[in-house]
Each structure stands twice: as structure tokens, then as C-alpha cells.
Amino acid sequence: MKHKKLSVFLAACLFAASAWAASDAKMNLFIDNLMSKMTLQEKIGQLNLPVTGDIVTGTAKSSDIAGKIKLGQVGGLFNLKGVEAIREIQKIAVEQSRLHIPLIFGMDVIHGYETVFPIPFALSMTWDMQAIERSARIASVEATADGIAWTFSPMVDICREPRWGRMSEGSGEDPYLGSRIAEAMVRGYQGIDLTDPTTMMACVKHFALYGAPEAGRDYNTVDMSRVRMFNEYFPPYKAAADAGAGSFMTSFNTVDYIPATGNRWLMTEVLRDMWHFNGFVVTDYTAISEMINHGLGDLQQVSALALNAGTDMDMVADGFVGTLEKSLQEGKVTLEAINTACRRILEAKYKLGLFDDPYRYLDAKRAKRDIYTNEHRAEARRIATESFVLLENSDNLLPLKKQGTIALVGPLANTRANMPGTWSVAATSDRYSTLLEAMQRAVGDKAQVLYAKGCNVCYDEELEKNSTMFGREMRDPRSAEEMRDEALRIASQADVIVAAMGEPSEMSGEASSRSDISILDAQKDLLTALKATGKPIVLLNFSGRATVMTWEKENFSTILNVWFGGSEAADAICDVVFGDVAPSGHLTASMPKNVGQVPIYYNHLNTGRPNPKWFTKFTSNYLDVDNEPLYPFGYGLSYTTFSYSPVALSSSTMTHDGSIKASVNVTNTGTREASEVVQLYIRDLVGSISRPVKELKDFARITLKPGETRTVEFTITADKLKFYNSELQYDCEPGEFDLMIGPNSRDVETLRFTLQ
Ligand code: BGC
């Protein structure tokens, strides 16, 4: 019987493999045929990805891009919104260019489309892979309904550097969690069939190491050992490639002193030869011409460098269209390299079904029906509630009752445009609620909500201006005293104060690095004044990065980090504040005590002089602060409590081909249903290279009713123990390992086992 099943299975595999080979052969034939008709200029044209600029419906025909499209000098366009505008442009390519090759339309659909999900950093706090996949799926349904076939997401750059504004776009500091999220996003966007008009092609970015810029300054130099790249920074990119992502984007930074875009080792040896990625690589915005500033030569030289490295498509720099023909004549690039890049882009279009029907993503009916639907919004709201992290609640002030008078204060309390968060290109913020509106709706006539802004983002007008761009300006012309007095007046009439503080949404994101990531001056003064009233205060902290909250922790007993929760953020915040949903987010980045501790991350190496107790002379510590983060990786409270039984190990020895099981009983010891994230960490005690003090290797997100107990079981196989050694060979080494289980990376129970 068993054999029969096996042979049926094998036959099915063979059938799938041969169907695959047949469809590949069909594609190759189609592309061979097409390419045989293409001129050199048309081939180079496919490698060109200009930005759309300000084309709107009706203006496409007269744009300068239209002329280039007719000549076959454009392969795709990006960040153009709306079926009509896109159709108009696609029509030019299909009807007026010589070979009728359709364009590919891309967009930064980063965390949702018009229904916006929490920023990716916040999404990662859910540790909920189904929710994350679902968010990408919904983003895909909406974006494809509006003409988009290609998204510049997921951004999978590991980041231990909260000064860097783009921490907001990634999944935090951990390679294991980052890898699971990368896969979930690719699955969500691409589904199982790219020709399905509700799926779109993913673009994994920014390859590679963009999340480790020196001093946290955007676009800055990155330099690290290859062992670190492979063990700590590469895993999410590789996971996304393994999940079948159709495209990759190069990063702006240097890797081994060569900008990623021109780095052959990275783009060809690692990505294609080692990882077998067979999609296409697009540069980041003007990354080719930026190599001139990096000191790699003039536009012709850097364009040749990029092509020879294995980069296929040039975003905005005009380097390929401007210089490759000349480079070919001068022998600096080969026709084969141009053909290869062109083929990869045509393959992507083929896989998306664009040659079958160039208008397959351009169905105006779908756009009306599928975007910003009630169902999508409900999902976004639910997922946002899972992303908030309860940092403090020692007085059990949360959840609030819907009664009495609530004073809602703070610069983030009544702003619509700041709710969705950075990189929400397709957002339609005028339809989203402010926190004030949502709160009024939530309490109805059961309670009274008073509002005062209380202060501006900060005293420095220039800093506020630079941190609130793209229509998200919010400066109040009143004096600080006037605003504060108003807040104190309403506070005096209230039973509880809810303070909506933190960063505006554009204080994180691209080119939004900060050297000081602690609370902004005007907000600190307002909170100090509010605290002096003696009223209970719920502090809601908005941010797009891990911030320093040392002062807040010392002064406030109730802190809920809400990041940027997307289009439904305001309602979701109320769901948690008023206890309809218990918070369950867990930190995916360590929160430092001060900026001097940065980079701070839980999965660090030991030193030769570990610090037994702060302060100990001649051990690895600071004079002025201990080594611990303020809140560790994996941390997050709930409205209930959970207890963990002692951990049980099925055996204390394991063979290379075998496995052992670790299990723990988790009980909800509180009075309400809630979710917990049970985390498994492992430490390799002795290795051929120094190994981290602990590494996340698995986790389980579980929901328990009050009093309910669940056994969580993790299986440990050799795969969980493997790492890249100094020869970059991937394997595990026999010896002793510590296995740790707990609700965060700090509070764990440790058991030992041996790999034979
Ligand atoms: C960003 C990318 C983005 C691209 C296109 C660049 O500035 O670094 O993440 O996809 O612009 O908008």
C-alpha cells in the first residue's frame, strides 16, 4: 500500500516536472523567436526602467516617455497609479512600438495598497506568518486590480541599527524570523501561479546588507565579514529566493568596497550560482549612476560594471540605454550579457502572462470592486491589533473602560495623513480615521473624549518640516505655552489622559536617519506637565523604529507602542486600548537604553571578557550604562499572564540525522483570552568559530482561553544547528548545545543537549 502511494506520488512529481519543462520549453521558444527579431537598441530598451513622473490619465500620450516607448526604449514603468493611466501607456507599447512588447508596471506596494497594513517593522511584531502572508495577498489583490504586476517588496534587510530610518521597512534584527517573514510575503504576493491576475511578482530588496549602514546614516558604507553576511544578514534574501521570488533589487551600499549594483560576486556568484536564483535583478533608484560618486568611473564605465556584475534592469539612471551600445562596440560588454539580461526581463513578462494579454491587470471593474473593501479593511484592523507591543502596564490601567472623561492629547492624536506610515504610495489618507475620530466612535455616548494637541512634534521647526513631508505636515502655529495650557485645561477635567506621542510617520523611512532616537523635546515637556497633574496616563508611542524609551519607562506605568498601524490603525488602537482585543505583539528589535548602546542585538557573540555584573573593571561593559537593552528582543506584555512549565527534552543526545523534541506547557493564568509567542533559542557552546550567545530557531504563536493549557512542541534537527564556518561551508558541528525556551530572548529556561 505504502509502495503504491509512493509510486503515485513519484508519478505525480514526474508529471509536474515534465509539465514544467514543457512550459519552460514553450517559453524559451517564444522568447528565442521574439529576440531574433529584436534590434540591439530594442534589447537594451527592455533593460530600461524610467520613473513615471507626473503622468496622470490623459497626459500619457504627450509625455516624453511615450516617445521612448514607441521606439522600444522602455521595459517597464513604476509608481503610476490607476487602471486608466496605465492602460493608456500600455496601449502605446502594445500598439505603437515595432514589436508590441508589453511593459511591466511596478510599484512600491510595501505594506498594502489602499488598504494599508502596519509598516513592515510593525507587521513583524505579530510573529503571525498567516497574517503576514494574508496582508501580502490582499495587497496583491488590490494592486493588481489597479494595474500593477510587480511590487518592490518584500524588503528583507536585517537591521540592528535603529538610527537608520528604514528599520521601519524591514522585519527587525533576527535572521530566522526575517526569513520566515520573507517567505510568507513572497507567497502572499506571488501565490502559486503568477499568471493568475490577482497575483504579482515580488522584488526582494535591497540586495544586500543595506540595513547595516555605518552610524545608521542612510546610503552609507557597509562593511562586514563574509561569515557574518552568510550567517546573519543573507538568510532572509536566500529564503525569499528559495520561495521563488521573481526579482531582486540591488542595494545602494557597497559590499566589500564595491557598490552592490556593480558587485559580480554578490549578483552572480552568490545570488545565481550559489542560490540558483533565476529571475531578474533591477537596480535601486539611480543606483547605477550613483556608482560615479562611489568612485567607480563615469556613466559608461559604471553601466558596464553593473551589466557585467549580473544586474539586468536599470532603474532611472539611463545608464544602460545611454551607454551599452557604445560599450559593446568598444568590447567592454558582450552581446551575450545584453541578451541574457533582456531574456530575463522578457521571461518575467512571460511568466506574468503579459504576452498572452497585456491588459490582464487592467480591468476597471475589478478596480472598483476589489480595492479598499470592507473585508480587507477588517483584516487590516485585526492584523494591526496584533502588531502593537505593550511595554508597560504595571498599574493595570489598560484596558480602559468606556466611561467618564478621557483627555486625548498629543501631536499624533488628530492626524489622518500620519496613520498609514511611511512608504504607503497608494494610500488614500483622506478616507482614514484619526485616533480622535476612532476614539469618539469607540466610546459612543458611554464616555466623553476631550482633545488638545498639546504640543508640536518638536520645538525645532526645521526638524519638524523635514520629518513631515509628502503632505503629512502638521505644524501648529500656536505658541508652546498656549498649546500646553490647552492640554492641561482638558486634562484637569478628565479621569484619564491618553497621550498620542512619538515620531510622525516620515521621521522614519528612506533618508530619515536620526542621531538621537529618544523622545523629542516638546513632547517630553508636555508629558512632564501632564504627569504633574497626577492623573493616570496611558502613553501611546508611535514610531517607525526601535526608539530609546528610558525616560518614559522611568516616568510612566502604562506604555503601548503602536508603531504605524496602517489605514485602520486608529480603530485598531481603540480595539486594544478599550480591551476588545488583548495586545500580543512582541519586539523584533532590541530597544536600547541609550543611543550609545547601538548596535545592540540579542544574538551577539560572547567576548573574551564577558561582563558578569555591571560595572566590572576589565570586562566588556560601559562606565555609564549596562549592556542590557531596555526591552529585549521578543518582549511584549498582554492583558493576561502566561505561565511556562519546566521544559522537557525527549533526549539529551542527538545524532546528525536524528531529531529531538523540546516541549513546554503554557497556561493562560489570567482572566481573558489572549495570544502568546513561545520562543525557542539555541546556543552552540563550542565551535570552529565563535557562535552567538543565542539564536532564535523556532517559535509558536498560540491563543489560549483563560485557564487553558497548551503543550508547545519544537523539533530540533541538524538544520537548526547548522551555520557557515570560516570556509563558508554550511553544516553543524558535534558538541554541546544550550536549548532555551521562553516568552522573550531574556527570560528563558535553559537545558543542555549533545549532538553526536
Ligand atoms: C528605494 C527603494 C524603492 C525605489 C523605487 C528607492 O529610493 O530605496 O526601496 O523601491 O526607490 O521607488
Image (spheres, rainbow, N blue to C red):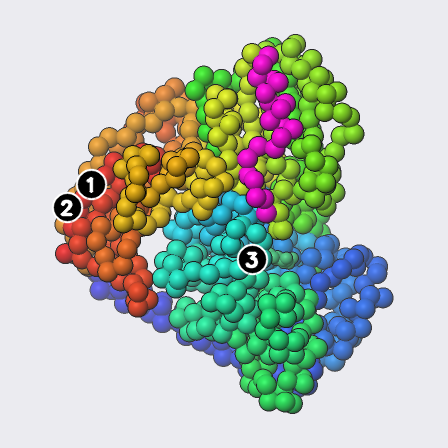
Q: Earlier in the sequence, mark 3 or mark 2?
A: 3
Residue 275 vertical position relative to residue 405 in the rendered view, above or below: below
State the residue position of label 2: 652
Q: Residues within 10 Å of mark 2 (few under 14, many from 20)?
A: some
- Picture quadrant where residue 91 is located: bottom right
Residue 326 vertical position relative to residue 547 in the rendered view, above or below: below
Asked if the residue at label 2 sits under 8 Å from ligand 1, the reply is no
Q: Quadrant of the N terminus?
A: bottom left
5 on left or right of 40: left
Mark-to-mark CA distance, 2 and 1: 9 Å
The label on residue 751 is 1
Residue 345 coordinates in the image, percent (x, y): 59, 72
| Dot 3 amino acid type | Asn
Which element is circle 2 on? loop
Question: How many numbered discs, if any?
Answer: 3
The label on residue 418 is none
Q: Measuring 65% from the left and 43% from the top, which residue is drawn there?
A: 506
Mark 2 touching mark 1, by CB under 8 A? yes
Q: Is residue 366 visible?
A: no
Residue 369 coordinates in the image, percent (x, y): 68, 46
Q: Is 525 within the magenta?
A: yes
Mark 2 vs mark 1, foreground winner is 1
Q: Residues within 10 Å of mark 1 (few under 14, many from 20)?
A: some
Q: Measuring 66% from the left and 75% from the top, which residue is drawn there?
A: 299
State the residue position of label 3: 220
Mark 3 vs mark 2, foreground winner is 3
